Amino acid sequence: MKLFPLIKRTLFEISLLTSDEYGSHKIYSKFSGVSFGRNVRIVGRIDFGSEPYLITIGNNVTITSGVRFITHDGGVGIFRKEFPGINVFGKITIGNSVFIGNNSIILPDITVGNNVVIGAASVVTKNIPDNVVVVGIPAKIIRTIDEYKINSIKKAIFITERNPEKRKKLILEALNK
């Protein structure tokens, strides 16, 4: 067993444990080569795949727990007897002001536009234009970002309280009205 990769992995894990949601992207960048913009929030563990240096993330992006970025087509391995060394790779580019929901998967050769919400557990198989909400397997546009905003404001509970107990009380009061 090589000691250096083990030490590097341990430093990566410790760094993630001691980082906050707005600082962990710097750790992923340093240890894996993902390119990040400003004000990137990572909630939980993310899988940036085997070629993280093919991934570019814009500004004001939130990536939630369990999201996977896949930058290669592993299926071509079935052709390796006929075509030794065959590999297919693709870049992934995420625009500005994007929210990627829990357990979503972004496949190779994908560009996600600006002002996009990707719903939880979606599988992104095609490029996503600006100003839309996508959900599903495969991810499909379900509404514009303006429609999402109007609907969200109707349902919203406006709370700026950060204390967990006070916040809980305010949320429960609002939902029980």
Image (cartoon, helix red, strand yellow):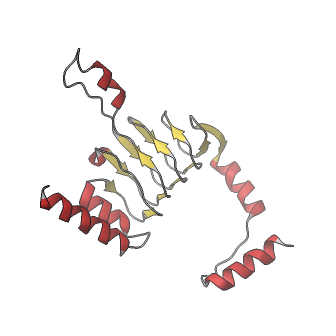
At 29% across and 59% down in the image, what residue appears? 29
Q: Quadrant of residue 157?
A: bottom right
Q: Is residue 64 above or below residue 70?
A: below
User: In the displayed structure, does residue 14 sit left or right of residue 119?
Assistant: left
Q: Count the marks: how many?
A: 0
At 48% across and 43% down in the image, what residue appears? 105
* Coordinates of residue 161 in the picture (x, y in percent): 64, 82
Nearest to the observer: residue 85 or residue 151: 85
Q: Residue most toward the right?
A: 177
User: In the displayed structure, does residue 35 sit left or right of residue 161?
Assistant: left
* Coordinates of residue 101 in the picture (x, y in percent): 55, 53
* Coordinates of residue 47 in the picture (x, y in percent): 39, 51
At 20% across and 61% down in the image, what residue appears? 6
At 35% across and 75% down in the image, what residue appears? 18
Image quadrant where one finds the N terminus: bottom left
Nearest to the observer: residue 9 or residue 129: 9
Image quadrant where one finds the C terminus: bottom right
Q: Is residue 96 above or below residue 24?
A: above
User: In the displayed structure, does residue 49 sit left or right of residue 127?
Assistant: left
* Coordinates of residue 150 in the picture (x, y in percent): 73, 55
